[in-house]
Amino acid sequence: MHKVSIIIPTKNSGKTIRKCLKSVRDQSYPNIEIVVVDNFSLDHTLKIAQKYADYVFSAAPERSAQRNYGVHKCTGEYVMIVDSDMYLSLNVIKECVEALKKDIIGIYIPEKILGNTFWTSVRNFERGFYNSTCIDTVRFLRKKDFEKIGGFDERLRVAEDWDFDRRIRILGKTTEIFAHVFHDESSFAIRKYIGKKKTYFHGLQIYQKKWNNDSDVRKQIGFFYRMIWVFIENNKWKRLCRHPILSIAMLLLRTMVGFEYLISKISMNNNCLV
């Protein structure tokens, strides 16, 4: 039976890490090791991790380096990248192992957003359109393939998951399983969300330059795909019709993010001219 190493980067993740680790320990697939790589947390993250994980390491400066370090240290044939605020449904790993056949290089895992507010419902509705698209990223693969592409690009602080996914897809085919992971966004607030996205914009330019602004980059960052096509391709427009209120709210949220991106882009261009 293949051993699966679950790589979890953490930093001050005390609010979510216990539930995350328990969801891994409760998996229906038995041969699992948990590798937590902590970025010198100041809360009780390490104490919780040491209770549930097989290995706990400390590494910096950020999540790409942590993930790479965890894969380097793990002993599994397969690896899965999990965020510390994600919880796995019961059969996620079992389905991933079964799906990773000879002609498959990596697995997409559908993601659901958790939260009790209207806006987290909107975020969950939005996230469902991105599964297995160029806005998503492979989370389960063979360790040898992770190493073959050199892991995550530690020069990228933003869009490192898109970059990783693209380099994996060059190696071969991908597929999507049925079981979900759950992403805890219970603390979601629009102003905080928009502010976080603003910090990403400069990093996106670095990613854009690395891939020479090719067709995938234009989809991931451009207006047409992010605001229109990703929501209607492959008959996904039917979901919009079934949920008009969520659709309008999602459009409003995407418009606010797009507006901030445009303002930031103009500001950066003006700074370059000074």
Image (spheres, grey):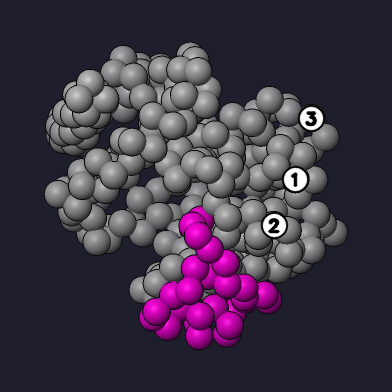
Work out whether mark 1 precedes mark 2 in sequence or the reverse, and give the earlier one: 2
Residue extent of the magenta highlight: 38-63
Where, quadrant-wise, is the N terminus in this rendering?
bottom right
Q: Is residue 222 left or right of residue 206?
A: left
Q: Position of residue 162 (x, y in %)?
A: 51, 35
Q: Is residue 73 left or right of residue 258?
A: right
* Residue type at the position of mark 3: Asp
**Residue 213 highlighted magenta (yes or no):** no
**In the rendered structure, are the residues bearing label 1 and label 2 in contact, judged by CB atoms less than 8 Å apart?**
yes
How far separated are the C-alphas under marks 3 and 1? 18 Å
Q: Position of residue 183 (x, y in %)?
A: 40, 55
Q: Residue 94 location in percent, x, y?
A: 68, 54
In the rendering, at what x and y percent does residue 204 appear? 39, 33
User: Which is in the foreground here, disc 3 or disc 1?
Assistant: 1
| Above or below for 55 versus 175 | below
* Numbered mark located on residue 103 in the image: 3
Q: CA distance from mark 1 to mark 2?
A: 8 Å
Q: Is 214 left or right of 255, judged from the image as shown?
A: right
Q: Residue 49: within the magenta? A: yes
Tell me the crowding category of disc 1: few under 14, some 14 to 19, or many 20 or more residues within 10 angstroms, Cα based. Answer: few
Instruction: Give the Cα separation between the discs numbered 3 and 2.
Output: 22 Å
Q: Which residue is mark 1?
A: 147
> Of marks 3 and 2, which one's residue comes earlier in the chain?
2
Residue for badge 2: 71
Residue nearest the viewer, comparing 185 with 73: 73
